[in-house]
């Protein structure tokens, strides 16, 4: 886990090096172990390193077989790839990125199809082509823009600005943020740099081997173009390409066809999940997990306990506010059953007012998900004990866990409704209608053969998962120099889970049916069939005593006034029935003060309270 930045198509090397050094220093929190900047013909790149694998020799950029690479994330199957292709004598380091350079020399971009991991990298190839590539789920971030100094990229949008301040956002994106809770159309306001108007920053789309950028400098191209864009029938992370694990004794086919029934499905799930957790543990620094007490994190904990001789360190965050749904009891029960080294931390009202502006600061590409708050506190607590943290993101999306999936499968006369966002944003001038229409467009599945359940899963996987859950995990952990890993979002697990029959995912009132059956066998202390409490952070209770101060000042924020009905915004902070809308508006006001006005995070909060 690191931060990367660079400029391609450089015409002034000395200026490019100054610019790139400034870029990487803005995201130095991602790589607390050190920064390196390096230039070559037509390029300049920088790397802020968080040392995970090969602590001495893994510094980047890496050079081998005529190519250069700079990357963020992990390639988990690097050992298997090195063994399969006989690379042992050719490797100069133990880095997980170096084998890719040798594979690229052998087979070009086909090498990218062999990768199993989370990554965002720039590969300057021996064949004159330069690639920007992001993993299939978008676990690791990558942002790009085109300016008069060249084509730039970075791990966070803030690196691409002159002073961290942005131009006013576009109305449709503010509407998405305040109604959906995240952005579909890329960083806020297209992240038009206030110092260089006219050049817009974009997210590099995630995955599926069709959303890469290739730049062919030898052909004279100075602008990037998509590398073989996806067409109908192309492979995706849900297909069974790569489903035979190379370089391993284990092999499996992810599709359920051919399995004799429930027992074989449980055994296959056990093998796939164990293998995923095993490779996700590869690290030369201390690792552990975040344990919520729910099914997904408990499944990860169960396998980590199986695979490690020493007790695995697990951190849990709870709330002492009476109306909060606190799962510390369930987490402690699991921790005792699995003999975990369990550590709990508490999130209270004082934490809320201290952490809220910091969350807004680190979410330069924003989401209003209040789960960012305890995630930040967990990372804060784990720092100094752990460097790598495994987490359960993706379990609900792949195994069918959300209640909205079950509702979508019911007929309307039994309360069924589409599995799409339920928008409650009357304070917006358009009521959120534009955001919902854009969500429907983005969520449309490419495969007409998907079942209704798979369509609902796909919609979350391409919208909610990368733009909210994974963004939250990346920013909150990297704020503290920690690496977050997601074993459920392994390509082998994804291919198996997504292609399960619907009855193996949703049955009766239970989602994640197969995962529950597996957990019932391997960790009964988790009580996998108990009614889920759900996850809430009691932000409304903490905001309530200050609502009278916040309402008028939030209504006065220019970016709020442009898309909201000001009287309706004030009503949100006076009407208890609308208390659930206070946090999104408060977050966006903080975000605006910090990222549009250039305020210090603490000063931003003070400006809203006094």
Image (spheres, rainbow, N blue to C red):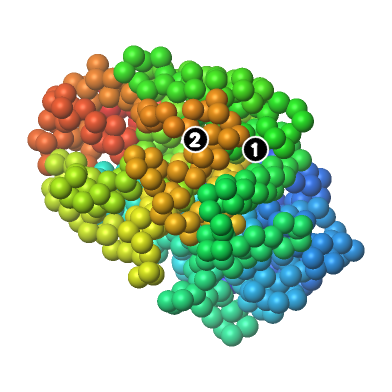
Residue closer to the observer: 24 or 404: 404
- x 14%, y 42%: residue: 426
Q: Position of residue 275 (x, y in %)?
A: 67, 49
Q: Position of residue 57 (x, y in %)?
A: 81, 50
Dot 1 or dot 2, earlier in sequence? 2
Quarter assignment of residue 214 = bottom right
Does residue 351 appear anywhere in the picture? no
- x 39%, y 58%: residue: 454
- x 57%, y 83%: residue: 220
Say the numbered circle drawn on residue 286. none
Q: Position of residue 23 (x, y in %)?
A: 55, 52
Q: Residue furthest right?
A: 89
**What is the spatial separation of the Cα atoms under label 1 and label 2, in whole angstroms?**
13 Å
> Mark 2 falls on what kind of element?
helix
Residue closer to the observer: 384 or 74: 74
Tell me whether the residue at label 1 lies in contact with that at label 2, contact meaning CB atoms closer than 8 angstroms: no
Q: Residues within 10 Å of mark 1 (few under 14, many from 20)?
A: many
Q: Which residue corresponds to mark 1?
A: 303
Q: Residues within 10 Å of mark 2 (few under 14, many from 20)?
A: many
Q: Is residue 215 above or below residue 511?
A: below
Q: Is residue 581 above or below residue 431?
A: above
């Amino acid at each position: 886990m690191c931060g990367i930045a660079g400029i391609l198509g450089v015409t002034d090397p000395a200026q490019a090096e100054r610019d790139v050094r400034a870029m990487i220093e803005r995201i130095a929190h991602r790589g607390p172990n050190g920064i390196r900047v390096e230039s070559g013909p037509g390029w300049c790149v920088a790397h802020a390193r968080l040392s995970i694998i090969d602590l001495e020799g893994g510094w980047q950029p890496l050079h081998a077989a005529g190519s250069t690479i700079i990357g963020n994330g992990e390639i988990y199957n690097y050992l298997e790839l090195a063994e399969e292709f006989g690379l042992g004598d050719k490797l100069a380091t133990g880095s997980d990125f170096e084998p890719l350079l040798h594979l690229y020399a052998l087979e070009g971009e086909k090498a990218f199809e062999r990768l199993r991991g989370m990554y965002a990298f720039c590969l300057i190839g021996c064949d004159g082509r330069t690639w920007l590539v992001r993993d299939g789920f978008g676990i690791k971030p990558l942002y790009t823009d085109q300016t008069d100094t060249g084509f730039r990229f970075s791990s966070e949008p803030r690196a691409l600005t002159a002073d961290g301040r942005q131009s006013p956002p576009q109305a449709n994106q503010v509407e998405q943020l305040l109604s959906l809770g995240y952005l579909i159309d890329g960083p806020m306001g297209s992240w038009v740099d206030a110092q260089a108007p006219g050049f817009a920053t974009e997210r590099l789309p995630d995955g599926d081997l069709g959303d890469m950028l290739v730049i062919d400098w030898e052909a004279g191209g100075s602008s990037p173009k998509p590398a073989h864009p996806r067409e109908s029938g192309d492979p995706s992370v849900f297909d069974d390409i790569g489903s035979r694990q190379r370089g391993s004794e284990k092999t499996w086919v992810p599709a359920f066809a051919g399995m004799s029934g429930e027992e074989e499905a449980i055994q296959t799930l056990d093998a796939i999940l164990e293998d995923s957790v095993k490779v996700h543990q590869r690290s030369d620094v201390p690792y552990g997990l975040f344990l919520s007490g729910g099914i997904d994190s408990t499944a990860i904990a169960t396998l980590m306990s199986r695979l490690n001789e020493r007790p695995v360190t697990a951190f849990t965050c709870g709330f002492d506010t009476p109306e909060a749904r606190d799962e510390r009891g369930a987490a402690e029960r699991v921790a005792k059953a699995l003999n975990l080294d369990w550590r709990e931390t508490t999130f209270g009202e004082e934490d809320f007012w201290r952490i809220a502006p910091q969350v807004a600061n680190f979410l330069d590409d924003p989401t209003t998900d209040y789960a960012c708050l305890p995630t930040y506190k967990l990372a804060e607590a784990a720092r100094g004990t752990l460097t790598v943290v495994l987490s359960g993101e993706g379990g609900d999306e792949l195994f069918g866990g959300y209640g909205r999936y079950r509702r979508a499968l019911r007929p309307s006369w039994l309360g069924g409704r589409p599995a799409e966002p339920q928008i409650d944003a009357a304070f917006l001038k358009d009521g959120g209608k534009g955001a919902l229409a854009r969500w429907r467009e983005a969520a449309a599945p490419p495969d007409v053969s998907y079942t209704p359940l798979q369509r609902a899963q796909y919609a979350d996987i391409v919208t909610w998962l990368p733009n909210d859950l994974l963004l939250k995990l990346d920013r909150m952990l990297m704020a503290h120099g920690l690496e977050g890993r997601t074993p459920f979002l392994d390509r082998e697990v994804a291919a198996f889970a997504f292609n399960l029959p619907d009855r193996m995912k949703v049955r009766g009132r239970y989602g994640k049916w197969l995962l529950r059956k597996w957990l019932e066998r391997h960790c009964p202390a988790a009580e996998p069939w108990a009614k889920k409490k759900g996850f809430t952070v009691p932000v409304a209770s903490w905001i309530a005593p200050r609502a009278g101060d916040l309402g008028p000042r939030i209504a006065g924020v220019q970016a709020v006034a442009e898309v909201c009905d000001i009287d309706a915004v004030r009503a949100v902070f006076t009407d208890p029935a609308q208390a659930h809308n206070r946090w999104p508006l408060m977050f966006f006001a903080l975000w605006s003060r910090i990222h549009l006005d250039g305020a210090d995070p603490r000063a931003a909060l003070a400006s809203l309270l006094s």
